[in-house]
Amino acid sequence: MKFLHLILRSFFRSKRRTVLTILSITVSVALIAILQSVLATLDGFANNPDASNRIVVRHKVSITNMLPMRYEDWIRQQPEVEAVMGLQWFQGVYIDRRNFFPNFASEAEYVTAIFKEEIVDYSDAQYRDFLRDRNGCIVGKALADKFGWKIGDVISLQSEIFPITVRLTVRCIFRSKRPADEMGLHFNYKLLEEGVFYMKGRTGNFFVRVRHPDDVPKLIERIDRHFRDAVEPTFSETENAFQLEFLKMMGNYTTIIQMITGAVLVAILIVTANTMAMAIRERTIEISVFRAMGFRTGQILLLLMGEGVLLSILGGVFGLGLAWAMAGAIRNVAGTFLPYLQNFTIDFGTMALCFQATLGVGVLSTFIPAYRATRRPIVDGLRSL
Amino acid sequence: MNGEPIIRLRRLAKSYYRETLEIPVLQGIDLDIPAGGYYALMGPSGSGKTTLLNLIAGIDRPSAGELDVCGFALNGLDDDELAAWRSAYVGFIFQNYNLVPVLTAFENVELPLLLTPMGRRERRERVVEAMERVNLMDRMENYPRQLSGGQEQRVAVARAIVSNPELLVADEPTGALDAKNAEEIMALLEGLNRDLGKTIVMVTHDPKAAHHARHQIHLEKGVLDRTVEVNR
């Protein structure tokens, strides 16, 4: 503790250099925290515990091939099944493509049964209105707030997949546990069947809710076995696996993010090592004087490494602060067109990871020049100018 | 001066190596310096006087011979033991003062005491005492850049004596000072030897400075040439 003031005094010996180094660490740590949080957010999306008892059934060939709606009857008869619903990704554009949000043609009567964990709070009266009105839709609160929609408002969605524009009346607004889950819109499947002739009796996916998650594997196997020899064979998977397939379309983002993180870490390591090497080199005589006075190797290492670690800790803390502020901006800005990012946050795990990484950088970048300084003969150090 | 040798050197030798080439710097040095002695090491450049001072101060190791200082055989101590020995027994005064620029005069003088178990209050008392000794009480909160060369060297002297070491080693303590300040520093060292009984070994080129010592040891090409008692 009595050496702390020595560390602090040396730390601010060259204020400009210290501030610039802290800034470079701050920016790098913020970048790492954001990248790792993006990864955590996407992973969370594909590892949604709320989706553990949901199966998505699609055409075996690809997600663009349709399945007959009649498959639903057989699936519903399976004892493990709690609910099943035909659902089609509509990709409707509201006024401008930049207003992107997920929208689906869904079998209205099953929407709340299938997405029980997402559609958690809604008015029964509004929901009944939605079921009664073929042109009705149910929307998340965050989405309604974003565009200022109220019950009874009419909105148009022009599909980018189907040659149809639907005019929908907002009939029900629901609340979810997470903001990202409030960014969706469901409208009555019949509207799609009526507007697009080749969608009559056909759907892109069935969402199946299983009574118990343990039954998921055997049900997947049974569904696919049952339809194996049909003209339109199925491919079933958990909802999380289905989401992961979409994420994979972005490429191997995990590797890309980890590579960028690694590169940034190496960059901070080099910057900090350079700063500490300079700081230690210009104090060669001073370190030798300390040693001559009787400071032992361990004490000199403590003083020098204390500076390096303090430098990286400050950079790390400021970096996490910056990342925290940026996370808010990302939620508010990017989250409006990338619903995945509605839940974007710097979680504790990411903060701990960044903190450990910066601590490691502080120790690694200082140890070698500090150790060398303690190994240099005192008389050589006193002679150097 | 009680006559007991505080420094005892026998057949002391030191060589440096430039790649495989051995360069002898000191050879066969036999020397006894009694406690309370004040010795000036003199000789031309390259005669080995600074090397001898460094060996006596325990910041360099001999190539051969025996080196007993303040009751310790320094050859037998490892690096950390030697560091602990230096902090307890040796005070250093350098030609360029070597104060830490980011610490005040008070904090510079306090540095050696950080290696002791002393509490803050006791450290403060010791620093004040040392600063009074060098007559710099009014400069305690000044940084080295706010002091003159003479004042800086007086702070360095205070730092050297604050832990009350038996031995003071000074390498050209007046080398960077003008005549007036040099005279003040020499008077200060003389007082420390006379009043506090500190053993002082000083390297100097300056005959005036050397005249303040009680003995002058002359080195020539790494060999002890002669020891002369100073007549005043």
Image (tube, grey):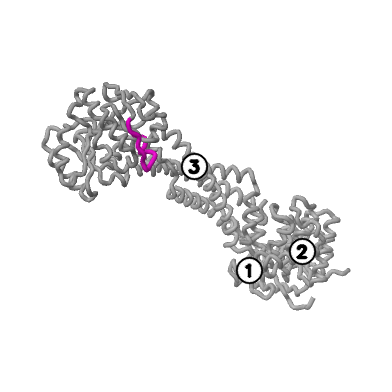
Instruction: Report x, y in % for residue A204.
Output: 22, 32
Q: Residues within 10 Å of mark 2 (few under 14, many from 20)?
A: many
Q: Residues within 10 Å of mark 3 (few under 14, many from 20)?
A: many
What number is the disc on residue B84?
A: 1
User: SS of the residue at dot 3?
Assistant: helix
Residue A150: name its quadrant: top left
**Residue ID for mark 3:** A323
Residue toward you, A199 or A345: A199
For the residues labelled 3 and 2, the Cα–Cα distance comes to 49 Å
Instruction: Report x, y in % for residue A112.
Output: 28, 39
Farthest right residue?
B232
Magenta span covers which residues? Answer: A171-184
Protein chain holding label 2: B
Mark 2 and mark 1 in contact? Answer it, CB < 8 Å: no
Which residue sits at x=70%, y=55%? B103
Tag 2: residue type? Val
Residue A24 shows in this picture: yes
